[in-house]
Image (spheres, helix red, strand yellow):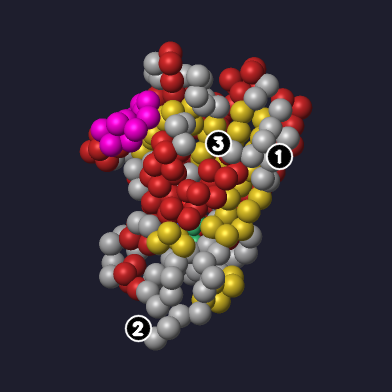
Amino acid sequence: MNKTALITGATSGIGKATAYEFAKQNIRLVLCGRRQERLDALQKEVGAIVDTYVLNFDVGNRKDVFEAIESLPEDFKHIDILINNAGNAHGLDPIQDGDINDWDAMMHSNVHGLLYVSKAIIPQMVQRESGHIINIGSSAGREVYPKGNVYCASKHAVAALTEGMRIDLNPHNVKVGAVNPGLVETEFSQVRFKGDAVADGVYKGFKALQAQDIAEIIYFAISRPPHVNIADLLVFPTAQANSVTVKKEPI
Ligand code: NDP
Ligand code: 8X3
């Protein structure tokens, strides 16, 4: 049977583009998110290309994660590839002005969510002595930028967890790696700025990475031969040198 991938955060941006890229490559899909209407649309559209099952749950809700993954029908229970992508930034404030609800939301999805979903899937990979996990980190997991405090901390946690998983799963033949993008034009900034117009300016004046660019890189990583593991990738748009150095044309 073809391989099956479970992608979290498949209702938008990088996760959604990865779903389409994998579908094109005939990889069976379990697609996850919280917005049911988008999951329904994916079931219809991606499901027309490849066998697809959608799951609605909040990755940071421990009980819901285990129940949802347990509820998978027999022919979708065997997960070969896990893409831990769900996550967002919430707010961009100096630490002294940060909203604790924003901090909780970031740790909830970016850290707890990645841990819970991994915990639900890893045992079957260990048992089969095979599997591949890709964690979507960020350039914010490599460096800290002004006002990025908690988001950067959550992505530094993803970097540490990726390394920890790779070490612990090494005896079990499970590949673990991270893809760490810089600025990608998705709904990310709309979420971060809660719909504020400032989000519209984030990707103006330069060509940002597109979700499809990252999807293709993820597919490259998961399609290497068995002896090759892409452990860690940092990907910027050409106009970006680090979190705060972006060559922008005047708008
Ligand atoms: P989007 O906002 O476009 O997509 C985020 C996805 O995550 C959505 O599908 C959303 O689905 C899902 N999600 C968020 N929180 C939860 C939750 N608690 N439970 C379940 N699903 C959740 O952003 P991106 O595609 O850009 O982001 C994807 C990943 O890439 C994130 O981890 C982000 O940190 C990372 N990243 C993004 C960069 C960028 O510049 N855009 C750069 C570097 C990394 P729903 O709302 O339906 O649940
Ligand atoms: C998203 C990239 O620079 O907005 O992880 O933090 S950035």
Distance of label 2 from label 1 (alpha carbons): 43 Å
The residue at 35%/63% (across/down) is 193
The span picked out in magenta is 43-55
> Which residue does the numbered mark 3 point to in the structure image?
115
Between 181 and 123, the one lying in front of the other is 181
Q: Which amino acid does label 1 sit on?
A: Val
Q: Quadrant of residue 166?
A: top right
Residue 179, image x and y in percent? 58, 50
The local crowd at label 1, few if under 14, some if 14 to 19, many if 20 or more residues have their Cα within 10 Å, is: few
Q: Looking at the image, tell me whether mark 3 or mark 2 is earlier in sequence order.
A: 3
Residue 86, image x and y in percent? 44, 44
**What secondary structure is marked by label 2?**
loop
Residue 176, image x and y in percent? 65, 38
The residue at 53%/43% (across/down) is 219
Q: Which mark is residue 101?
A: none
Above/below status of 53 relative to 251 = above
> Which residue does the numbered mark 1 point to in the structure image?
228
Q: Total marks drawn?
A: 3
**Front label number (2 vs 1):** 1
